[in-house]
Image: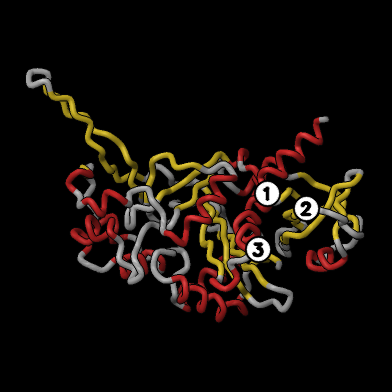
Amino acid sequence: MIVRPVRQDDLPSLLELARSAGSGLTTLPADLERLAHRVGWAEKTFAAAAERADADYLFVMVDDDDQVLGITGLAGAVGLREPWYNYRVGMTLSASPKLGIYRPIPTLFLVNDLCGLSEVCSLFLRADKRVGTNGKLLSKSRFLFLAEFAHLFSERIIAEMRGVSDEEGRSPFWEGLGRHFFKMPFAEADYLTGIGNKAFIAELMPRFPLYTPLLPEAAREVIGKVHCHTEAALRLLQGEGFSHRGYVDIFDGGAVIECETAQIRALRDSRTLVLSVGTPDNGEDYLIFNRSLADCRITCAPARVAAGSLVVSATTARRLKLNAGAQVRAVPLSVSSSHAHLRGDMS
């Protein structure tokens, strides 16, 4: 498997992926025109022809036959061209010393706090390909790209996780809150956001703090939670250093997690090595990046470090479009292996 930049000829496969994703994956709308527009911006971005506010690093994961199996992305900066809203989960204190009442009340505040930050986004893998290391490659490949081109991104990075919804796409959070102000189904609001129509949020969403005890219990219970299909992706990001710091999605209440960019494990522990082609006997799985912007190629393959070089198979070198002697950026795929790798460097 290889992760590479998206191309216009990937559009039919992207549309199929978007349709299979269902509601909740806002950045991958099942709309051909919007997808084509996004792919066009991605091509400009990888050609270094887009400003950071418009930068959209959209990648696809493909097999050796170049068949698209998944999608993943990085946004240069959110909220600099279009409104970007979140709820911050906070607390309001109500007190009456005379009555001996002191009561903290959980509250949702509508904020634009995360505007200007980079975002990891658009992660989706075909259901029949969620095996082996595919999911880890698709998610973590972005962090090697971040390590190589850190100057293109913010010092803090976020990820909006898909919130809880049922098999019919109904969101308890939306039903308990958003529907009262927007008078439309969750899927429709999510779709409008995905195709870039975000002005209605500012026009219809209440600006005053919302007291969560007034929400139905079903809505309160999913605040900061993620969809069952998103739990594996959440665990991967948490293993890389991301955590939930109190922000949630305004539509489905899903957690927004974040991390200081320099502290992401795969970014922090990655290093540049000379590629050596041979037999990686008993090698462990590595994420390996050819360090290119326009012709970016990232894979996961067995490899071993020997005398400052990364020994990989001829097949892996071919997938990266590299010859022996080229420089690569690499990091152990697993967190535990990365820590052992670092301890070995220090001994």
Q: Secondary structure at mark 3?
A: loop
Q: Disc 3 residue type?
A: Gly
Residue 96 in sight in this render: yes
Q: What mark, if any, has residue 264 been given in the picture?
A: none
The disc, 1 or 2, on the residue closer to the chain's N-terminal end is 2
Q: Secondary structure at mark 2?
A: strand
Image coordinates for residue 286, horizontal then vertical, percent: 75, 53
Q: Secondary structure at mark 1?
A: loop
Distance CA(mark 3)–CA(mark 1):
13 Å
| Nearer the observer, 131 or 210 | 131
Distance CA(mark 1)–CA(mark 2):
9 Å
Quadrant containing the N terminus is: bottom right
Image coordinates for residue 181, horizontal then vertical, percent: 20, 59
Residue denoted by label 1:
334
Contact check, label 1 and label 2, Cβ < 8 Å: yes
Residue at the spot 50% in from the left edge and 46% down from the top edge: 117
Left or right for 118, reference 245? right
Q: Disc 1 residue type?
A: Ser
Q: Disc 2 residue type?
A: Glu
Residue denoted by label 2:
284
Residue denoted by label 3:
132
Q: Residue furthest front?
A: 282
Q: Residues within 10 Å of mark 3 (few under 14, many from 20)?
A: few
The disc, 3 or 1, on the residue closer to the chain's N-terminal end is 3
Distance CA(mark 3)–CA(mark 2):
14 Å
| Nearer the observer, 26 or 313 | 313
| Nearer the observer, 311 or 209 | 311
Q: Residue furthest top?
A: 98
